[in-house]
Image: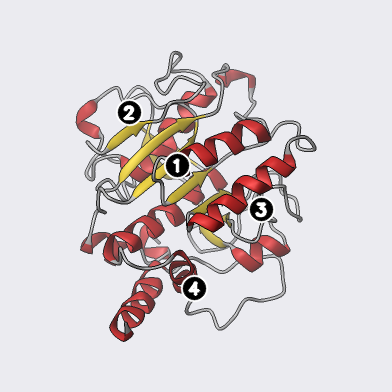
Amino acid sequence: MNALDLVKLSPLMERTSGRAEVIVALIDGPVLMENADQWSANIRHAISKVPAVCARAESAACMHGTFVAGVLAARRGSGAVSICPGCTLLIHPIFAETDARNGAMPSASPDALSEAIVSSIDAGARVLNLSVGLTDSGKGENRLLQALDYAAARGVIPIVAAGNQATVGSSAITHHRWVVPVAACDGGGRPVEETNLGGSIARNGFRAPGVDIPSLAPDGTNRQFRGTSAAAPFVTGAVALLWSEFPGARAEQVRLALASGYGGRTANVVPPLLNAWAAYETLTRIAARS
C-alpha cells in the first residue's frame, strides 16, 4: 500500500499543502538544496552553532537532514513525499558533519538538543521534528526535560523518532509525557525489525511508514530511506496540516484528535497506526461545537 494511503494522509494533503503561518522546526542535520526548484519557498534557517547549509554533501548529517527536510518541504511533484510544503520549515541543525561511510548515524548532546528546542519555540515553531540520537545520554537530561516541559507549556508538539536499536524501553526523550514518539512500520503497517518499541512509545506515540520512503538527496536526486527518522515526519507533517486547517485548535485538541479512532490505548509496547484523516474528522467535530 502507498505510504501516504496507509496512514490516511492522502485526503488531507488533497485539501491543503499547509499554511506559511504554521512553522515546523527541523532539528536535525544541515540541508543542501542543490536544485532550488525542488524545494518550497517557505524555508528559513535558524541561528545555530552548526551551519544550516551542508559543507560536505557526503556527510551523514547532510544526507539525514536533507532527506527529512524533503519529506516535509520538497515541492510536490519533486519525487519526495512532500507532505506540507506550504508550511514554513525552520531548519535548526545540531548534527556535526561526519563521513557517512563510517556507518555512524549523526547524533547530538542533550544540551545541544535542549538549546535547539527552546530556540525553535522562541522563533515561533508550533511543531518540532526530532529525528535524533543522543550522545552522553546520562548528562544534560534534566535540561532536556525542562526544554520539553517548556514545549508543553507553550503548546508546541515535539514529534520524536523512537530510534532504530530494536530495543524495548524508553529514552530520555521518548518517556516525556508531552512527546509524541514515532515507531517505523512496513507497507502493511507491521513494525519493522529495527524500530524501538516500549510502554511510553505505545502510550503516547504512533506507527508510521518507515520503509523505502522517497525523498531528496543532497545532490538533488531521489533516494529512498528507512527507519524511524523516515517515519517521524509523517506524523509531523500530519500535525502541520491539521493546524493549517484548524489554526485555532489547541495543542491538546490536536493530540486528542491524533489519538481518535483507536478505542483507547493498549497496554502493550506497539503504538497504533497513524490515521491522519480520522484526526481531521475529529477536529472538524470539535470546531463545529465551538
> Nearer the observer, disc 2 or disc 1?
1
Q: Is residue 223 left or right of residue 163?
A: left
Q: In the rendered image, which residue does mark 1 sit on?
A: 122
Label 4 near label 3: C-beta < 8 Å? Answer: no
Kindly identify which residue carries mark 4. Answer: 256
Check disc 3 and report the residue beneath it. 174
Q: Quadrant of residue 280?
A: bottom left
Of badges 4 and 2, nearer the viewer stands 4
Of mark 4 and mark 2, the one earlier in the sequence is: 2
Q: Is residue 223 above or below residue 253?
A: above
Nearest to N terminus: mark 3 or mark 2: 3
Between the residue at mark 1 and the residue at mark 3, the CA separation in whole angstroms equals 22 Å
Q: What amino acid type is highlighted by mark number 1?
A: Asp
- What residue did someone put label 2 on? 221
Q: CA distance from mark 4 to mark 2?
A: 38 Å
Q: Amino acid at mark 4?
A: Leu
- 3 or 4: tag closer to the N-terminus: 3
